[in-house]
Amino acid sequence: MQQEAAAVDEALEVWIDQDLCTGDGICAQYAPEVFELDIDGLAYVKGAGDELLQDKGATTPVPLPLLTDVVDSAKECPGECIHVRRVSDSVEVYGPDAE
């Protein structure tokens, strides 16, 4: 997959649209280092020190060793609310708005 090869060479970030989150927790199962369900039943990304980032549109870097897990989370998410984009130009490479 050409798109995947290009994405690996660049810094990526991920964010969750809580308005679409169904609270299934698939993302937290795939990549608990990046995603977590909060007491409101919705998933959020985690920042430095496992801090839950609850601001709307909050992003966190995708660690290269976890890229496959994060991408699988985006692909399997029933709410289609996980967005992975390049940091350099904010183009979504995985998720519902990926081209």
Image (tube, grey):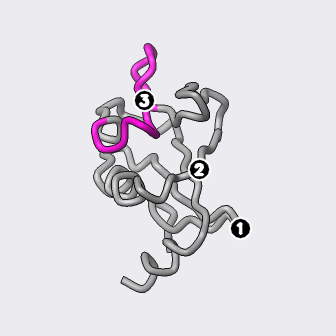
What is the number of the mark on residue 61? Answer: 2
Residue marked by disc 3: 36
The amino acid type of the residue labelled 1 equals Ser
Residue 71 rendering spot, x and y as whole percentages: 38, 58
Q: Quadrant of residue 79?
A: top left
Badge 2: how crowded within 10 Å, few (<14), some, or many (20+)?
Answer: some
Please tell me which of labels 3 and 1 falls first in the chain: 3
Residue 40 rendering spot, x and y as whole percentages: 45, 16
Drawn side of residue 70 relative to residue 6, left or right = left
Vertical relation: 83 (above or below) 28:
below
Please tell me which of labels 3 and 2 falls first in the chain: 3
Residue drawn 30% across the image and 44% down it: 30
Query: Which image quarter holds the N terminus?
Result: bottom left
Residue extending farthest to the bottom is: 2
In the image, the segment drawn in magenta is 29-43
Residue 17 rendering spot, x and y as whole percentages: 53, 41
Vertical relation: 96 (above or below) 27:
below
Badge 1: how crowded within 10 Å, few (<14), some, or many (20+)?
Answer: few
Report the magenta stretch's main SS.
loop
Residue drawn 28% across the image and 37% down it: 29
Q: Report if residue 32 lies within the magenta region.
A: yes
